[in-house]
Amino acid sequence: MLHLKNILNNSISILFRILIVAVSFFILISKFISYNEYFKRNLVMGNAVLMLLGIVFFSFLYFWFGRFGFQLSGVKCAVVLIVLFVVQVIISLGSMYGTGWDAGTLTEDAYNLAIGNSFEPGYYSHYTNNMLSLVLYSVFFSFATHIGLSSYVQAYGLCVVFNCIIYYCVGLLLADSIYKLTGDKKMRALGFCICYVFVCISPWNFVLYTDSLGIIFPVLVLWIYLSINVDSVKKTVIKWIVLLLVSIVGFHIKAESLIMFIAIVIAHSIHVFVENKGVEIIKKLIPIMLILVLAVPAFKLGDYSVIKIYENQTGVEHDREKSFSMFHWLMIGMNVDSDGTFNGEDDTFSHYISDREERVSQNKKVVKQRLKKMGLGGFSELMIHKLILNYNDGSFGNGLDGEGFITDKFSQDTPANSWIRFFYRPDHKGFSVYLSLMQLLWLGMLFFSLFVKNEWKYQLIMLSIIGLSEFVMLFEAQPRYLIVFAPIYIITGILGMNNFFDLAKKLLMHS
């Protein structure tokens, strides 16, 4: 039994470190591997140099924050936070533009819905995960028109401000989560600053899509779990119910959000099993068992509620027969020719099957055929390509189409906004500098993630990243799918960096 407990206690940590080593290794040799050309970025330096610079940069920040403290509080802290938010809004409004692909479809449909124009509802019958986002953004657009922002660009700008609020709250939740995990105010401040640059003022901030609405949920679920202290069975049950409800809402905006909840349930259960004996294990697992029993009806109720909200808001009846199942995305994920990313052939294949059961059956059939054809060697090669495709981009796929990523420039360049657009717009020369800076931060975070302590509260974070990686490796691959976990990667990097320098100090003291 003791041996089993040791295995359970260490398995997550070992798997996580294997994942990060594999990710880092394949990123560093990615230029020697032939994978989907569309996802390759134009960086000013190679990944090896950028990783080294990322390590140096994070080390400099660690010692800088450690020496000067940055112990802002009270009025001074409030002023700094307000100024940073205003700067975030200025950057976002100054560089915003309209995009194509699904984000453009959802944005335009939300605006048309808000002002009473017609839109094509068939898209949402196929892609039901976009229903709730459509309704939410239509509410934002409607609010904008009611306060006099009548043009599309003005209303879009107000929605961007809402996005800014969401992203800024992500930074605050992240910082407080770091403090709850470490008790170190300097690490809290450092985490917020990294999040501000890497997430809060990211160009994704002004893309109105599920990523922007969904980015808050993984870190919010983590923060709730760390924040609500429980000293009774009643409070414990309430805590898990809150976590479940928030996770259900997050799932209906961005499916990956649910991974954090699953990771917390698993890691917490392992911790209870390892740290307790006999009846105590059963007693402490009862609330989780109750939540798992409630999970299935809760998710069914969530599906029903989202569809009803969508139907009431749009006046359109949802056609369940058209909705794509998880096997559609698994089929795409197993497409060797496209390296498991979106492709028109697979999408068309599913679209032209009108019966849901038949579509699921055909999707499963194609998956089996592809797995049989590729064999173990082909499957391993596909996984390597998908790993690189997903992880080798600190911007999470922003502006991959280059100038074509922008379908509506909204306004011309002016002296007031040119300095922002030079770095933030993919049709400007400085965009490669921005991409390289994000890659530097990203690779630095990945390196320091290796040194996260093997403690159970850290293990749930590690497990969530393992779960996300499995998700994007099996289903459709997109670097953009990692963005909702960007705050979690920052937390992991900060925790690892803190432990790395603590270990370094102890070694120096003993030498």
Image: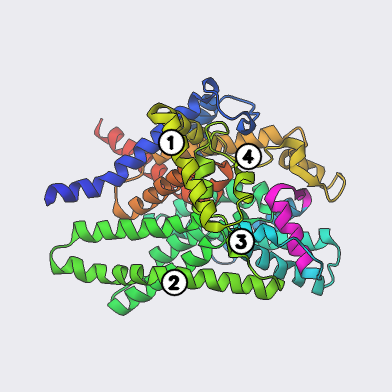
The residue to which callout 4 is attached is 345
Where residue 298 is drawn, which disc sits there? 2
Which residues fall within the magenta stretch?
A: 94-113
Q: CA distance from mark 1 to mark 3?
A: 40 Å
Q: Mark 1 highlights which residue? A: 371
Residue 498 occupies quadrant: top left
Mark 4 and mark 3 lie on one chain; the one further toward the N terminus is: 3
Residue 504 lies in what quarter of the image?
Answer: top left
The location of residue 59, given as percent across then percent down, is: 47, 37
Q: Nearer the viewer, mark 2 or mark 3?
A: 2
Looking at this view, is 237 or 475 the one in front? Answer: 475
In the image, what residue type sits under mark 2?
Ala
Q: Position of residue 473 (x, y in %)?
A: 46, 41
Q: Earlier in the sequence, mark 4 or mark 2?
A: 2
CA separation in Å, label 4 and label 3: 36 Å
> Which one is closest to the eye, mark 4 or mark 3?
4
Residue type, mark 3 in image: Ile
Residue plotted at (44% across, 44% down): 469
The answer to whether 403 is drawn above or below residue 12 in the figure is above
Q: Nearer the viewer, mark 1 or mark 3?
A: 1
Label 2 to label 1, Cα distance in Å? Answer: 34 Å
- Judge the density around disc 3: few (<14), some (14-19), many (≥20) Cα neighbours within 10 Å: some
Q: Are marks 2 and 1 in contact (CB under 8 Å)?
A: no
Q: Mark 3 falls on what kind of element? A: helix
Pointers 4 and 1 in contact (C-beta within 8 Å): no
Q: Main secondary structure of the magenta part?
A: helix
Give the residue type that dot 4 points to. Glu
Q: Dot 1 lies on which element?
A: helix
Q: Which of the two labelled residues, at mark 4 and mark 1, occupies the earlier sequence position?
A: 4
Residue sitting farthest toward the bottom: 234
Identify residue for label 3: 166
Q: Camera-side residue: 145 or 321? A: 321
